[in-house]
Image: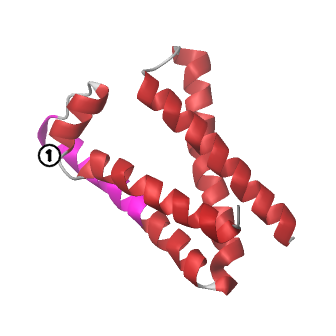
């Protein structure tokens, strides 16, 4: 799989997750994860997370289209996915197992972090 494909697949995969966090969080997060989102403060936090996710998607797409940004985009992908996965692993150790969707996210994050690392090793 090429680095461009990795960046594109990560971008495509993150869009529905971003939307589930921020488009209508009171409905989507309650339905998907059983998380009650009540009031402006909760909604504000989840919409900020959506914005962070979309900012990363934009950068990964820039790396997809612009060769000079490909390596920095892979670094961003590695740090983003690796950071999420590290937090989830810590939570597994400290808190126990979450629902199946969050386990799927962990597996996907580890996979994309690994693919980004592989791309960086090839380009280095």
Residue behind mark 1: 40
- Is 43 included in the stretch rendered in magenta? yes
**Residue 117 visible:** yes
Q: Is residue 6 above or below residue 59?
A: above
Going by the image, does 109 lie left or right of 118? left
- Disc 1, SS: helix
Residue in view at x 56 percent, y 42 percent: 84
Percent x, y of residue 11: 48, 62
Q: Vertical placement of 45 versus 54: above or below?
A: above
The residue stretch that appears in magenta: 38-54
**Of the pair 17 and 46, the residue shown nearer to us:** 17
Magenta segment, prevailing SS (helix, strand or loop): helix
**Image quadrant in which the N terminus is located:** bottom right
Residue 32 in percent (x, y) is at 29, 31
Q: Which quarter of the rendering shows the C terminus?
A: bottom right
The residue at the point 69 percent across, 67 percent down is: 3
Query: Which quarter of the figure has residue 108?
Result: top right
All told, the count of numbered labels is 1
- Spot occupied by residue 45 in the image (x, y as percentages of width and height): 29, 47
Q: Is residue 23 above or below residue 59?
A: above
């Amino acid at each position: 799989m090429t680095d461009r494909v990795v960046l594109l697949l990560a971008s495509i995969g993150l869009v529905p997750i971003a939307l589930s966090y921020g488009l209508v969080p009171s409905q989507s997060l309650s339905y998907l994860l059983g998380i009650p989102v009540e009031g402006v403060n909760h909604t504000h936090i989840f919409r900020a997370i959506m914005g962070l996710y979309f900012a990363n998607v934009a950068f990964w797409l820039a790396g997809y289209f612009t060769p000079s940004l490909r390596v920095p985009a892979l670094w961003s992908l590695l740090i983003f996915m690796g950071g999420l996965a590290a937090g989830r692993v810590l939570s597994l150790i400290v808190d126990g197992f979450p629902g199946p969707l969050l386990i799927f996210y962990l597996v996907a994050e580890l996979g994309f972090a690994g693919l980004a690392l592989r791309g960086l090793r090839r380009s280095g």
